[in-house]
Amino acid sequence: MSLRDRIIAVDDLQREIVKIDQWGVEVEVRGMSGAARAAIVQDAADNNGNVNFAKMMPEVVVTCVYDPTTGEPVFTHADKDTIMSKNGAALEKINTVAMRLSGFGSDAIDVAGKDSSSTPNGGSSSN
């Protein structure tokens, strides 16, 4: 098997079971694929490259939260407004884990945890 084939065959998306005390449940949080990560950041960025985390947060939850029993997504895009009405600490916990699993730098994770509509430049850093 070639190196290319070995890389393509690897299931490299990280997963973590996260207890959400506010909801009395455990969810599986999965890291984003490169395509999902790029689309979420692009959709949440304004013309100056600032990321609107209020717009990004529900997208991350929809993309990354799965039922640990069935492996099915918990939410759909139709749930975005409802998601934003839920406990902020629960959403922050999910977003922090999802961003860490997706390779966002610690600066982006710190900013994502703040209740801010826009933050400096891109929301991502290299490690």
Image (tube, rainbow, N blue to C red):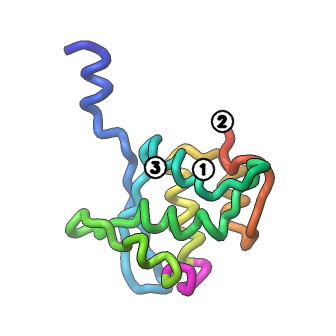
**Residue occupying the point 80% across, 52% down:** 120
**SS of the residue under disc 1:** helix
Q: Foreground mark, 2 or 3?
A: 3
Q: Where is residue 60 in the image (x, y as percent from the top left)?
A: 51, 62
Image side of residue 58 versus residue 4, left or right = right
Instruction: Give the residue at mark 3.
Output: 36
In the image, taking residue 61 as reference, residue 51 lies left or right, namely: right
For label 2, the crowd category at 10 Å Cα-Cα, with few meaning under 14, some 14 to 19 and many 20 or more, is few
Between 56 and 104, which is closer to the camera in this rendering?
56
Q: Which residue: 24% across, 63% down?
A: 71
Which of the labelled discs sits on residue 126, or is there none? 2
Identify residue type, mark 2: Ser
Earlier sequence position, callout 1 versus callout 2: 1
Identity of the residue furthest to the front in this view: 47
Q: Name the residue under label 1.
A: 42
Single out the mark in the foreground, 1 or 2: 1
Whichever of callouts 2 and 3 sits on the residue coming sooner in the sequence is: 3
* Secondary structure type for disc 2: loop
Q: Is residue 110 left or right of residue 14?
A: right
Q: Disc 2 to disc 3, how far (Cα)?
A: 17 Å
Which segment is the magenta one?
83-89
Q: Nearer the viewer, residue 16 or 82?
A: 82
Q: How far across and how far down the image is residue 22, in percent?
A: 50, 86
Q: In which quarter of the image is residue 84?
A: bottom right
Mark 3 neighbour density, 10 Å: few (under 14) some (14–19) many (20 or more): some
* Residue 96 location, quadrant: bottom right
